[in-house]
Amino acid sequence: MQVNKTYNGADALCATLLANGVDVCFTNPGTSEMHFVAALDREEDMRCVLGTFEGVVTGAADGYARMADKPAATLLHLGPGLANGLANLHNARRAGTPIINVVGDHATYHLPYDAPLTSDIESLARPMSASVRRVRDSGDVSQATAEAIGSSRQNGGQIATLILPADAAWSPASTVVHHAPTPAASVNEKAVQLAADALRNGKKTIIIAGGKALRDEPLRLGSRIANATGARVLAEGAITRMERGQGRVMADRVPYAVDLALDKLREAEQLILVDAVAPVAFFAYPEKPSRLTPPGCEIITLAQPGDDIVGALRALADAVAANQAAPSLAGSADCPQLPVEGWDAPKIMQAVATLLPEGAIVCDEAITAGRLNFALMAGSAPHDYLQLTGGAIGVGIPLATGAAIARPDRKVVALQADGSGMYTMQGLWTQARENLDVLTVIFANRRYAILYNELKMMGVETPGNNARRMLDLDSPPFDWVSMGKAAGVESARAENLATFIDLFRAGLSRRGPFLIEAWL
Amino acid sequence: MQVNKTYNGADALCATLLANGVDVCFTNPGTSEMHFVAALDREEDMRCVLGTFEGVVTGAADGYARMADKPAATLLHLGPGLANGLANLHNARRAGTPIINVVGDHATYHLPYDAPLTSDIESLARPMSASVRRVRDSGDVSQATAEAIGSSRQNGGQIATLILPADAAWSPASTVVHHAPTPAASVNEKAVQLAADALRNGKKTIIIAGGKALRDEPLRLGSRIANATGARVLAEGAITRMERGQGRVMADRVPYAVDLALDKLREAEQLILVDAVAPVAFFAYPEKPSRLTPPGCEIITLAQPGDDIVGALRALADAVAANQAAPSLAGSADCPQLPVEGWDAPKIMQAVATLLPEGAIVCDEAITAGRLNFALMAGSAPHDYLQLTGGAIGVGIPLATGAAIARPDRKVVALQADGSGMYTMQGLWTQARENLDVLTVIFANRRYAILYNELKMMGVETPGNNARRMLDLDSPPFDWVSMGKAAGVESARAENLATFIDLFRAGLSRRGPFLIEAWL
């Protein structure tokens, strides 16, 4: 790019991001962001990844940050562009993912004219952001950007939204670049003591591990502690990223279904939370409790998001003399056999679990069809497991997209329900554009199956016309092979197990995006 | 449906909507809305239309209400479901469209537990809603619903958002149904007098007509007034719904491009606004003004949204003795000839303008490719013209979907840019599901062409790698024929004018959705 060489606010933004290690920007720009686009164009160190819908942009930023352990930036076009990305920012917020949103806005002096694209960006941003900051002018850009990056690093990972008026982007700026502090993680010694006391008091104890406590090292520590003291380790219900599979700790998860969760936690007299929150029901139901722990169950928080999770667990292991205890690891015997017959979602997952390659990154938004995914993959080859965290469907395809950008050396396996997949299928195009190594399995049951279950729980056995027309996706069936083709992703349909296994193996053996529609 | 016969809050909501004439509900429900789904299932008079993404739901509600002249309801799933629909609610707000959003939320007592899908729905809703009301309990449902319907009817059409906690839906309710008032529209006599005085003072005057002033009758009155007094009539820049074509008033539109708009308004000494706002630049640019009227131009508001528009124009016509003046109507000579050669967006539009059938509803989101659409269709067969109003791209396919639901007796012609179309292409599935009579033309230029123009205006003639990767949609090209097939919509590609004309004629001659990818 040969013109507009004056260093401006947009350049300051770019430079501040790069100086703080933020070198990937997921974008869908518009006119008010063109000066930032021009600045990005001058910065070859910044990798810009286009999503053709903002739900892809923010979901990919989530997947990227979960796997890169550092934030990505997003570039969004005013209030509506941010709005389109909010559902996946909601998921990212629940995942504790660091993201810096750059939301372009009109030039400051233009706002009073209430031009058509004007809206209250702050009001839209706040529910899904830990911090929202409007840049004052071009002189404020670097400081504001550093603050946003700093905010994104707080509490283990947060959403920071930066509103960039067009005139702050296009006006001349100083080349001074601000740096964001990295918060120091510490161990809460008092909490360690309380947890150690609890583990020795003879009461039935469950250790709930969430967030960064689901990585290999903290899980091993947790498992040693549990085995030394008679406690049990459970992963929280919605998993940001868990390192699991053979040679890794085998731990169950708090179930989604209220009755199953109540049952799983029924005997707990005390809970020790490690980067997790006390489990509550995903939804309320008449006559069912909101809190999933039994009445009187004591809750002890060993470590909160942003604390030194491994440090806290080490201190606790020392305190309860757990360092010699063996962790409970998954072995090859925990992996199912390759199935040879049958054709349903669990059989498909059994095949996936058996064939999953070492180092795979699994992005799971299979919803109802995937109820057994987590259990079936406990003994798969070692892998990372990422999940829908906030219940806002449509994260799967973008999550896989971002994870693949973060880790081009690893195979991403996306397990995707069809109804949720239809929310953000534009992400397949980004996978093709960037030639990402993502193998997607669509569980095509052609209905919002989870909602049929919910209706059943309400006692409705035979839904009528209006209900069926809101819950069925079958007339016409959405054709995912054509969808993949539309987006430039090689795609094929499996209608039986043998074909599925052949296609899955084919998908594993090649590099680049591939989609299998498992027609249930 | 054979169970759950107790009349509950969800039934009260349904009954109140129907009693107030709201009998179409665009939906994407979730668990927290299942009692409302069950209630809808018991009400055969309510037509439920599923969108497989909420941007489709809200955009279709907009298209429906623009053509039905009454509100639709939407059913959205908590904060994230609403968030997904906000961009098209933004457009609907700018269009002055009446919509009643029913946003399900957790049971009231469940909210303090901060379950994963909890978010600040009010903060999300407010920027795009004229009113936001949380239902207190099941006894409050009918009153709150009537208030929302009433709010949606204010000021000519507004967005009313109703937050429905799950327990308010499932708890028993009274069968008393509340009715919403219809606001009385009045004529501002003082404004009529001011406008009449202005039209007689010899200054150069432009009458800007927007909102409901763009229907046939008010436009004729406006044109008579203009012709009797030497004024000029212009349509506002973003058109909610304009009745135009042969036998209708021929009026130009305030251009989108700032320089063209400044030029068009340069000589105006006074503006008379009829259900319109004074024109401002869509975006700010360095060294260009925000206000498009010349300095010192006087602004007179004859009628505001919600006023008696026709009454005000009649009174003005009487006051300036314009009733005998002839309006300026389009005739067959204003329609272009069917082109016989060439292949670019204007040629395609020339063909569309020539072949457009009487009574067509044109939904235009062709953006850069459609710059000449409005002018070329001035002399087409009489039709309604609907446009992207708020600048939040992704309204076209949903708008056409909703318009077709409102007017099954008329052909809907959707003129769609490819980049914007990728935002809400799920709407094609709804067109197939409901067998809607929509003929879609995709202007596939495989780039965000408007942004290339913007870069050029910044002096960037040769964008670099990062800019091109944010503005191009060409590697791989998105394949709309496969996309249509995925959604169950018969689709075909045209790469030359003869094929396009054949396909367009074929699309007109059949009923049901049909898509033509015009490969530019």
Image (tube, coloured by chain):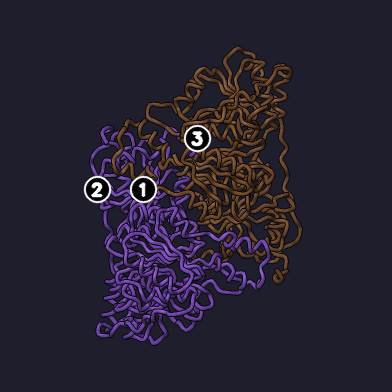
Chain colours: A brown, B purple
Could you tell me if residue B133 is visible in this image? no
> Can you tell which quarter of the image residue A2 is in?
bottom right
Give the residue number, with chain letter if any, for mark 3: A370
Secondary element at tag 3: helix
Q: Nearer the viewer, mark 3 or mark 1?
A: 1
State whether residue A111 appears in this view: yes
Amino acid on which disc 2 is placed: Asp
Characterize the local packing of mark 3: few (<14), some (14-19) or many (20 or more) Cα atoms within 10 angstroms.
many
Q: Are marks 3 and 2 in contact (CB under 8 Å)?
A: no
Q: Chain of mark 3?
A: A
Residue A519's quadrant in the figure? top left
N-terminal label among 3 and 1: 3
Q: Which residue is mark 1?
A: A475
> What separation in Å lies between label 3 and label 1 (alpha carbons)?
23 Å
Q: Residue at x 72, y 53 (%)?
A: A18
Q: What is the C-alpha distance between the residues marked 2 and 1? A: 21 Å
The picture quadrant where one finds residue A13 is bottom right
Describe the element under mark 1 as helix, strand or loop: loop
Where residue B445 appears, as percent x and y from the top left, is 53, 67
Q: Position of residue A400 (x, y in %)?
A: 59, 45
B338 w.r.t. A90: above or below? below
* SS type, badge 2: loop
- The answer to whether residue B171 is left or right of residue B365 is left
Q: Amino acid at mark 3?
A: Gly
Observer-nearest of B505 and B318: B505
Q: Quadrant of the image for the N terminus of chain B?
A: top left
- Classify residue A96 as left or right of residue B275: right
Same chain under badges 3 and 1? The reply is yes
Q: Residues within 10 Å of mark 1 (few under 14, many from 20)?
A: some
Q: Answer yes or no: are tags 3 and 2 on the same subunit.
A: no
